[in-house]
Image (cartoon, rainbow, N blue to C red):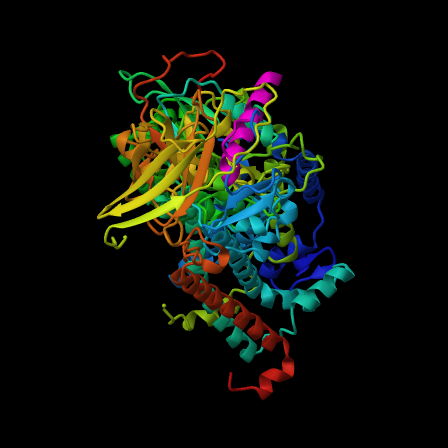
Amino acid sequence: MKDLKVKGQQFDTRRERDVLRYLISNSRGDKLWIGVLLFFVVLGLIGYYRQLKFGLIVTAMRDYTSWGIYISNFVFFVAASLVGSLFSSILRLNKNEWARPLIRVSEMIAVAAIICAAAIIIVDMGRPDRFLYVIKYLRIQSPIIWDVIIISTYLAISLLMLYVSVLPDLAFCRDRLTVIPRWKKRFYRLLAINWENNPKQREILAKISLILAVSVLPVAFAIHTITSWLFATTWRPGWDSTNLGPYFVSGAFMTGAAMIIVAMFFIRKHLNLKAYLTDIHFDRMGKLLVLLSLVYLYFNINEYLGPSFKMVGVEGEHITELFVGKYAPMYWFVQVGGLILPIVLLIIKKFRKPLPMMVISMFVIVGAWLKRYLIVIPSLQHPYLPIQGVDESYLHYYPTWEEWAITISSVAWFLLIVTVLMKIFPVIPIHKESTKGQQRKNKLGRKKNVNPALMILCFFSLSSIPNFSAYGQEAMQDAHIELAFEEIDDTQKIVATVYDSVNMPVEEVDLYFYVKRTFGLLPIGDVFNTTDESGIVEVEFPVDLPGGEDGQVMIVVKLMESDIYNDLTLETTKNWGVPTSLDVSEEQRSLWAAAANAPIPLVIITSSIILAMWFMIFYIIYMLIKISRKNGLKIDDTL
Amino acid sequence: MENKTSKTDSRRDFLRKLTSGGAVAASGMALYSLTSCKNKSEDKATLLTTDGKLVQVSDSEIQALEERSVSPAEARQGIPGKKFVMVVDLGKCKNAKKCIEACDKHHNLTPDRPYIKVLKMQDNEKSSPYWMPKKCFQCDNPPCVKVCPVGATYKRTDGIVLIDNERCIGCRFCMAACPYSARVFNWGTPPDEDADITYSPETSVPSEVGTVGKCDFCPDMLRMNKLPHCVTSCPNGVIYFGDEIDDTVSNGEQTVRLSSLLKDKAGYRYMEELGTEPRVYYLPPVDRLFPFENDSDNFEGT
């Protein structure tokens, strides 16, 4: 039993030794690996420091290309996080026993990916200091809010899934590992919450892991579907598609499977787990990747065939640029190298071996990342209105070193999180049978009244005002106007009579009639309204002109540009307009209303989903607390 | 340049007098005293309130109103009883870019990211190109407002869509959502960020780094019953602006019925099919005032 001893730690079985060896080891390879990752993390931090200092100007993003590789990277990580549900839920509920050793890796990748996705979206914000406004001023109508909610929900579920799955192993580490530092012992003691592996505890754990397995699936689909809605709710070419949800989800599963393969390859090699991650696992994962890629290929064809057949306006320009334009090399690399070729190769049994599969999966992952680039950037460069009158730099998008540094560092963060998780949690379950108890319980499935002719006479007496003119225009005379308003049937008339200073009617004078409006005087009547021999001019008032609340309108009559008479203005208010109700009634409930006026169905749907999911999360936490209370289990037998 | 400024200023001054109710009559030259039956004293102006009453306000009060900037909370309330609307006559535009200059000046914008763009448009190969001044369309079904996670951009009762840059988180979802590319972003520190001006969403100054900006229909001017800067600065009277409830629009010199203008000249809204219900109308580029001349500095993008 000599070979069961590693660095002074005695193990009972070979499986225990093989699984736990990495947790107690501290090899130079590990240090180098973490060192390299930290280097890229620091590089990213320098980039982000510069971005915080100068603003998003350090990026190549400008108006038009207003989202760049941050957003494509975000979508990529959201996609990667879906893999947790693929293994912990789909394969598990389908009783794919072979996939069991992969559950934990997938959960670790899911946790790391969703943390990186959440972080990268904050990096993309122009004002990260206002992050909490998302909670303070939350508007449930915004798909971003839906995304924030679902990401936090999925993060909580992913953490719980990982935790529930490692709990028995944590207790084992607490009880059995002797050669680990003290903080690590305390850490295991804290996290193992009094797990004694008694039947009652196992029963609760089996129950909650099944609840998690069932509930994670809709949340996983939702997380990537909602992420696709960030694009699908706009009119951009390539985004304005009903296909986007399933397209994103299927692409995510493909990416996730490829990630698992790459992870398997390195874990198996570096952690010496050849006996547990066998060629059979690779073969099965290869077939699974083919299946998932075929589904994605199907949605890809759906995504491009319709628009490329129709070639409508900007959508056509977008398609042209992807197929034969400046993005063509990338586009065809993604479609052929990252999708078709992997399918073809992986059909051949010979390629379903660890090394070729790892290489093919790397192509799939790189293709998946570039695919997100192609989804985000070219679409923004084809707006409905031409891009003109802006700086040259607004026309292209070449990411800056800061953007690349931050993006690469996000990948480093991702790998670092996965590495740390693998350092503290056994990557595959220590005991095979510790998961068996759950299996058996897998039975749960899911106008104006016209008065008679009325004559109103208005007489405006005008005081003659001394003329202050410095230029001496003695020749100019004062005139005055009498206004009469007639209402006969449907017509309203303004009758103006012009008199001179000795009260004689004036002939051949032009009067101007206006209705006062917000931004000026609206002319009414003819272009020239000239007085007749009796000094009278008649102007018809428009029937349908809107007035104030009671239909009041201000009529302005002017005498201007006369060679004989001084300029003169008369104003009077009449209720000849069409009354308009100043109904500044409350804002209607709508998608563009303020947060408080969100549409009721939307509020009900979102809040019930949030309540259901978070009730479930808190229920699981409650059950975990129950597990931690040794005595509580015995007293409270009803639950 | 100096001349142009004083010219626009005197015109604006004239307009203000024109609009300030009773005090009309004279042009800005003060050859005659400002007379009106309603006028009791020279330093008072008669204003028509929104509920149709005439009130007398001293000029100093008007001045005070001009100085006051509306707080972000107050700016969420639209100007009561108004529905602002714009009509752009494409037959009159010759790409003089005076609207852009006036807008940039009043909003402290740098030439690389103006709120207004005058686009060279050509509907098809056989039709003649024309200039299309484009601002924010202030949609009644605004895609940008729908997607804002924090309500930093909002639709007011007077139809204007504004941005509160003290709330904007800089996610740029509104920029992606706007089908008309109306929005600009403060990628770096804007030149006026340290200016000693109280911020108001109604003036959109000062701009703030990491937040979104766009054409705001100049609500600070509208509160004073003045036309937006682009309207008054246009040498050709291309842009008409007004209140839909009034059914009247004005380009500063000419005041016309909105409904008859749109009927007579076949007014349309850009990309009606999107259902965004813009508050900006266009009059087709027919009966042109100027021949189309392409100038080199308005380069074309992709």
- As for residue A597 lying within the magenta part, the answer is no
Quadrant location, the C terminus of chain B = top left
Determine if residue B136 is in view: no
Camera sees residue A298: yes
Using residue A578 as the reference point, say whether residue A171 is left or right of it.
right
Q: Depth check: B76 or B273 in front?
A: B76
Q: Vertically, is A85 above or below A457?
A: below
Q: Is residue A177 left or right of residue B247?
A: right
Q: Position of residue A242 (x, y in %)?
A: 33, 45
Nearer-the-camera pick, A510 or A193? A510
* Magenta highlight on residue B12: yes
Q: Position of residue B90 (x, y in %)?
A: 36, 24
Asked which quadrant contains residue A13, the reply is: bottom right
Q: Is residue A268 above or below residue A620?
A: above
Q: Residue at x 25, y 31 (%)?
A: A309
Q: Nearer the viewer, residue A571 or A19?
A: A571
Vertically, is B234 above or below B21? Answer: above
Quadrant for residue A293, please give it.
top left
Give the magenta-colored segment's residue range. Answer: B1-30
Q: Residue at x 47, y 18 (%)?
A: B96
